[in-house]
Image (cartoon, coloured by chain):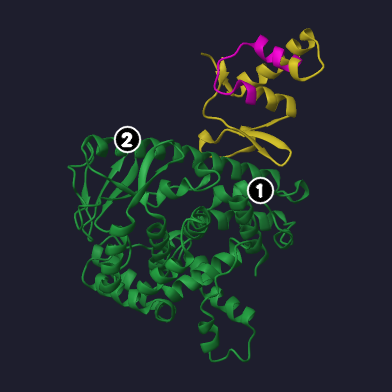
Chain colours: A green, B yellow
Amino acid sequence: MDKTLQALFALLQAGLWGRFDEAAALAFPLSAGEWERVFTLARQQTVTGIAFRGLDFLPEEAAPPMDIMVKWMAHADRIEQSNRVMNETVSKLFGHFASAGVEAVLQKGQGVAAMYPEPLLRECGDIDLYFPGHDGVSDPLAGIDGAVRERQPDDSWSYAVDGIIVEHHTDLLDIQSPRAKRYVKRLMEEKGFEKVVTGGGVEVLVPAPEVNLLLLSSHILKHAFGVGIGLRQFCDYAVARRYYEGRVNPQEMREIWKKTGLEKWQSLLEEFIGRFLDSDCALARNDNEDFQNDKCHSERSEESFYKKKTGVLLDIVLKGGNFGVYSKDRENVPRARWARKVQTFKALMGNIGFAFRYAPGEWFWTTMQLLGGQFR
Amino acid sequence: MRLNPKLKLRQVGKKFMVVDADTGSAKMTNVFTFNASAAMLWQRAGANTFEPEDLALWLCEAYDVDMATACADVDVLLKCWIEGGLVING
């Protein structure tokens, strides 16, 4: 693996778990040019704040040059400031919904940030909301005062509050297969939701642990075989997995992955996280069947099999960065809705090999949804 | 006076720094490096209002230094902080 990428993963592991392991330390020291590349990679993957925390655990002699350190610090400051604004907006929104007697659920975002050791250093994006009991309805309220709302192709509503995009979704999860959807609905009813306190001290409702893990995993999948995905979403999953340790039953989770048709995808995700972001966590290689069924397995070791397997996903991550915004294919994002759909369709087709191997059902139904005009 | 609430003291390794990122670009001119005693004063002041005498007193409490020396050191320090916009009145 490229030295700068190895260094970024080492910084991320330190930023997430508070320590460097000996293997990670091999990536250092770096030249000024290599540090510049690590910083750029971190920005593209929207993990600048997490990696910045990792710098704190680096021996002084391995630290980046002062000019890069300063840029990094300034970036971390801006991330924290954005998160403070975000927390105030979340507080305002949840106050608004509560006073109207509407129960809102926070999807990802600050609900996941709360699980991080330093929530303010996780880069924030939009506010995604779901309203239980209003299935298929993304607009149980007239919206927040003064906000101009726009209806999206997937029936969700979006508007801006304090410059932050708020989206009301019709579904909690990015799962498109009708059979899996029916199962997820039952699972949501069974597991429900729970309260967490965000980094800003606001109590919000988030999905129950099992559903939240499913939400985070399926979100990564959708973007992995679509326009692209960044490391921040993988960090989210890694942090949530640790946060829920002991609260979710691994056997039950395996059932959930199986019933949603995501068993193979989940195995890849776990392997990816174990290899790059959480090397302390025991790998969940429950799918040795996958290795055994590999035509060439007799010629390759199990280690090289998994290295190749995660390498495919890593290529997708590096190609586009955060939601594919750094992908060459997306340098010119068309304005027309139909043209954007064509672009997404091309991205889905481009990842067909990957999708067919790890989540063929979801890929098929996502493509159908896109063709039907519902793809987000 | 009090510390500029937009600024944050950060420790990376053994270094203490404040970067004024509000200008939109991080230039070396917007970077303030602190020694351990200045960092201690910054952390102790936090979000509270303070007078120069408070800082001098905190220095005396933390280090083996007399009040006159501490006051002189604080004067120099505060001059830099005021010029750099690190502290504001009120």
Towards the viewer: A172 or A26? A172
Q: Position of residue A298 (x, y in %)?
A: 61, 91
Q: Secondary structure at mark 1?
A: helix
In the image: residue A65, left or right of residue A89: right
In the image: residue B70, left or right of residue A153: right
Report the residue at 24% width, 67% height from top: A338
Q: Few, some or many C-alpha atoms within 10 Å of disc 1 (few <14, some 14-19, many ≥20)?
A: many
For the question of whether residue A225 can be seen, the reply is no
Write down the chain letter for disc 2: A
For marks 1 and 2, give the one nearer the viewer.
2
Report the residue at 35% width, 62% height from top: A333
Write down the chain letter for disc 1: A
Q: Which residue is mark 2?
A: A92
Q: Few, some or many C-alpha atoms within 10 Å of disc 2 (few <14, some 14-19, many ≥20)?
A: some
Q: Position of residue A216 (x, y in %)?
A: 42, 60
Q: Residue furthest right?
A: B64
Residue type of the residue flagged with mark 1: Leu
Point out the stretch of residues depicted in magenta.
B43-60
Q: Quadrant of residue A360?
A: bottom left
- Check residue B50 for magenta coloring: yes
Q: Which mark is residue A55?
A: 1
Q: Secondary structure at mark 2?
A: helix
Q: Are marks 1 and 2 on the same chain?
A: yes
- A299 is higher (above) or lower (below) than A19: below
The disc, 1 or 2, on the residue closer to the chain's N-terminal end is 1
Q: Position of residue B89 (x, y in %)?
A: 53, 14
